[in-house]
Image (spheres, rainbow, N blue to C red):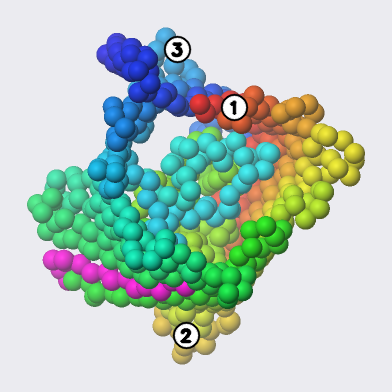
Amino acid sequence: MRKHLFLLLVTLALGQALKAQDKLTVYGAGRFSMHSGGVSGDVYDGLVIGADTLSPDTVSARSEMAGYALFDLGFQFRPNAQTEIKALTRVYSELDGFWGQGINFNFRELYVRGIVKGKVKYRVGDLDLKMSKFTLYNSNGDLGAHDNNATHLYEDIIQYENFFRNNSWRQQGLQTSFKLKLPGNGNRLDVMAFLAKNRQADYFFTPDRLLSGGMLSYEKLGWGKLDYYRTELFEIAETAPFSGQAQRISTQSIAGTLKNPKLGRYVYHFEAGLSNMHYIEFEPEPSTETGAFFQLGLREMAKEKKLHYFANFNYVESQFRSPGAQSRRNNFSAAPTQFSFQGNQENVRQQTVFDVLTDPTAYFRTIDPILGAFNPAYSNVQPYGEATPNRTGLQAGFRMNQDSSWVEKLDAHIWLMSEVNGEGTDKRRSFMRADVSTTLNFAGLLQTDKALLLEAYLKYEQTGRDPIDSELSAIAGIGEIDLSSVFLELTIAKEISDDLFIHAGMYLLQASGNEYMAVRNEFNQITDYTEMDIELTDRTLLAGIKYSLNQNNHLLIQVRNSNITNEQIIGKSYSINQALITYNLFF
């Protein structure tokens, strides 16, 4: 403890010395969060099921008060005009960590970046990597991005804690890039390459896993771009002497964008690529798999217009593998931070909508070669983003900005898709998804300068598969599918005074039907199917007040009531009532 405090004091003293020379910028964040509440319902109280009696839960906590405080202090050093060093250290304490007990210090971010000879850029340490949606891309969560008055603060915290900024993946390694001017006015070639350590070896059975890749981008001024992307996720067998095995997955694609006023007001784009997955020294060695994809689309180009629309056609084969784009953000196997366990067997409580929207620990932070498990009640059409394998179909939509004095935003999307190949049968699933989101401000209609916002988001998904004849089924026990789900997010916010809002909202997820979930082995091969009978209603009512001291400084006080009815858990239903206080600061 004393060593950590001494190091912090020395760093601050050094920082002041450098700041005096205009070589230092201080940045960081602070947060205080506390929640208090209780749980009740059949899951905890016991009930009669037919001739059986469910014993009351005598193990799990019925009420809970917890929280934490943290402070992130970062320093941006500029030892010279060509070099920048960023280091961020965190002090974290649970609320019951009196007199320094339970306080921990750690480095949260550390990297060096600079430019050599004014031409070649480099970055060493923490990297934020992103390329195309089919090669390296951190897709939004299953319930989308949430920027309304009730959950925007939580969304900021989730993005910050997990380094999800701009849909990038946080890795550690080396990145370099440079630009080349080509003949012709404004023509150029951009080059980017990186090498990152994706997994640490245990020096016995688990080898190091590395992620490498890069991009070549040719831009012709006034016409568009042509891009080449490549990623490699590979293991080094020699780093684990008792393993001797290694896996390699490579993905590459070519993408193009065509835009020129002579061709009209549209931007035309395409991307096509393939993947290769193979194994070294496995006994027996799995077969090498290759897969391909392509996307064609257009979007309206004129930025000054209020209406923007787009359409895409996707085709992604079953064997297409792209860990950098197919790794899931939501982690439904993670234990929720609040009321983590249920039942006398201390079963991990299944995540609810409120957990997904507010808990930073409910997310993956790294790239994984295995297609992760997902909950079809939350998302079933594209659970791995646009690179979801075994999907083909059309996506279209539009966005309207400031159409009138009270319509601030209106978005609508639709997906009409199906499987490329049936899973376990010749019959293929069909998928439909429709999203609508809007922000309305009635201040003008009410002739007041205080905002009155109605923010709404509605997502509907439908999955179906026709009944299966026995002679068409490759695997016994699978059959017809009929699953539908609706997610509704509704918030009303009233501005009381400058930067002070009161709000009330509702989140509702309803899912009903059945689905057959693929069981995959370590080689991503489907080995079996598990049938899920889904009857889920997850409803949260909340109300609160938010005060913004400035754009990056917010205080949020909320109360919420969540009622969950889920046929997949013993006892089926329970409720959570809570009061939450969160103060969040970025500087």
Q: Answer whether labels 1 and 3 touch (C-beta < 8 Å).
A: no
Q: Earlier in the sequence, mark 1 or mark 2?
A: 2
Q: Characterize the local packing of mark 1: few (<14), some (14-19) or many (20 or more) Cα atoms within 10 angstroms.
A: some
Q: Is residue 501 left or right of residue 54?
A: right
What distance separates the C-alpha of mark 1 from that of mark 2? 55 Å
Can residue 135 be seen? Answer: no
Q: Is residue 21 left or right of residue 545?
A: left
Q: Nearer the viewer, residue 223 or 451?
A: 223
Q: Nearer the viewer, residue 55 or 115?
A: 115
Q: Earlier in the sequence, mark 1 or mark 3?
A: 3
Secondary structure at numbered mark 3 = helix
Q: Earlier in the sequence, mark 2 or mark 3?
A: 3
Q: Position of residue 381 (x, y in %)?
A: 55, 67
Q: Which mark is residue 426?
A: 2
Please name the residue that numbered disc 1 is placed on.
Answer: 553
Secondary structure at numbered mark 1 = strand
Q: Position of residue 550 (x, y in %)?
A: 63, 27
The image shows residue 516, relative to residue 492, as above or below, that is below
Please name the residue that numbered disc 3 is placed on.
Answer: 98
Q: Characterize the local packing of mark 2: few (<14), some (14-19) or many (20 or more) Cα atoms within 10 angstroms.
A: some
The kind of residue tagged 3 is Phe
Q: Characterize the local packing of mark 3: few (<14), some (14-19) or many (20 or more) Cα atoms within 10 angstroms.
A: few
* Residue range of the region highlighted in magenta in the rendering: 269-284
Q: Position of residue 111 (x, y in %)?
A: 31, 36
- The mark lying in front, picked from 1 and 3, is 1
Residue at image coords 31%, 15%: 14
